[in-house]
Amino acid sequence: MKLEDINKIFHVRGASQGTIKLGPVVSADGDLQNDEQHHFISHAHTDHFRRKKIWNTWDIPRPIIATTPTLKLLESYGVNTSFNHQLVVNQEHGKVVKYDSGAKVRLLENNHILGSVQIEVEYEGERFGYSGDFGENIENFIDVDYLIMDATYAGKPVNKIWSREEAMSRLVEEINDAIQTGPVNICAPSGLLNEIADSIGHSGFWDEYKNVISNQIIKDWCDVYREYKYKQPNIITEEDNFDLYREILDSDKYIRFANRTRDFKRSVPDGTTFWIENRNIDSEEPIKQDNSESSWYNVTLSSHAFSEEIFRYVTKVKPKYIITDASRGGTTAQELERLLKLNFPKIQIVSSNLLGY
């Protein structure tokens, strides 16, 4: 069977939707589809789900399914999953669930953020899978014939000589040094920011700096991560406690969390800023001082797999067919297709944008 021949039941819809279709009855992320019976959310990053479409599930006979941590994190965006609604279903890591449609689904940890999963679907003898956004050092892998792969890093070879653990340790040291002389701003995507907070916390840092200023979404994510035994600071928001927020902001030393640089409301905030890019990891050093701002440091830490880790993933899953996900970047999907073909000539591989999605 040619890969192009199976795209009606196994494909990625276009970038405007970002829906991963895993066989005739299951889809994941993006928009809800008219022909699906079960809709899974791989994780709680907003480029992987459409909030308005999830709200619409209250009026349709199809459930939203995710892990419990993902459902809790979704609430930070106003998606109410806390009440016992029959169309909100939690499925835990590692458990195989057979649904009324006949689909058997297993969710496995993929080391991206809290609650994130690989998705394995068995339906009428066919096995479909989605890697989701996946990180390094995965221990358990889905077992599928047809695989849709995240293409964030496109398998690009990198020249770095440092490990992720070394980068995290170095960042913790730099933050400890910087707070001795003034304010520290830490800007990173949700999930990665919480992981950094946990690493800082293991040194007892949050015993001294109990209050961190930030916004409500970051506060909600810290609360959920803390529930799962990650060391997180107490977040003070301007909305919840304006006086304390301003008191901290006006002090000589404070910590501020952000997900985006525009959250600072100034192009260069006071104190030392660590901007964790979550990409561009092809760097000899994990932390570099910015060329134009001496108090600004670019940190090349990521929650995504890259290079040899991507190839290791394919080796472990052993699919017969691969579609690289172009819903968040057509160029990277085509580049990953090219590199996978070089490394796995026996697997039929194509990027989803070449299928017309």
Image: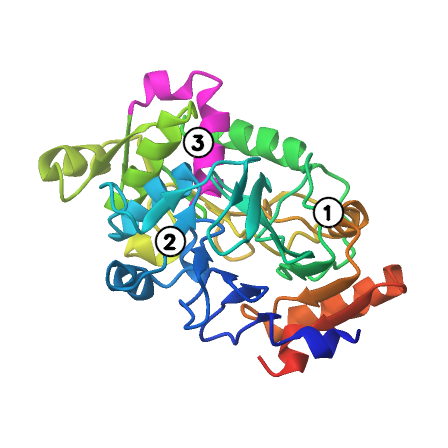
- Mark 1, residues whose alpha carbon is within 10 Å: few (<14), some, or many (≥20)? few
Circle 1 is placed at which residue position? 284
Numbered disc 2: secondary structure: strand
Q: Residue 243 vs residue 34: left or right?
A: left
Of the two numbered discs 3 and 1 in the rendering, the one whose residue sits closer to the viewer: 3
Q: Main secondary structure of the magenta part?
A: helix
Instruction: Residue 10: name its quadrant.
Output: bottom right
Separation of residues labelled 3 and 2 (CA atoms): 30 Å
Residue type at the position of mark 1: Glu
The mark nearer the N terminus, 3 or 1, is 3
* Magenta residues, start to end: 190-210
The mark nearer the N terminus, 1 or 2, is 2
Separation of residues labelled 3 and 1 (CA atoms): 24 Å
Residue type at the position of mark 3: Ala
Marks 1 and 2: CB-CB under 8 Å? no
Circle 2 is placed at which residue position? 64
The picture places residue 125, in percent across and down from the top left corner, at 69, 56
Which disc is residue 197 wearing? 3
Q: Residue 286 vs residue 38: left or right?
A: right
The mark nearer the N terminus, 3 or 2, is 2
Quadrant, the C terminus: bottom right
Q: Is residue 33 above or below residue 76?
A: below
- Mark 3, residues whose alpha carbon is within 10 Å: few (<14), some, or many (≥20)? many
The picture places residue 77, in percent across and down from the top left corner, at 28, 52
The picture places residue 282, in percent across and down from the top left corner, at 70, 54
In the depicted view, which residue is nearer to us: 149 or 246? 149
Q: Residue furthest left?
A: 243
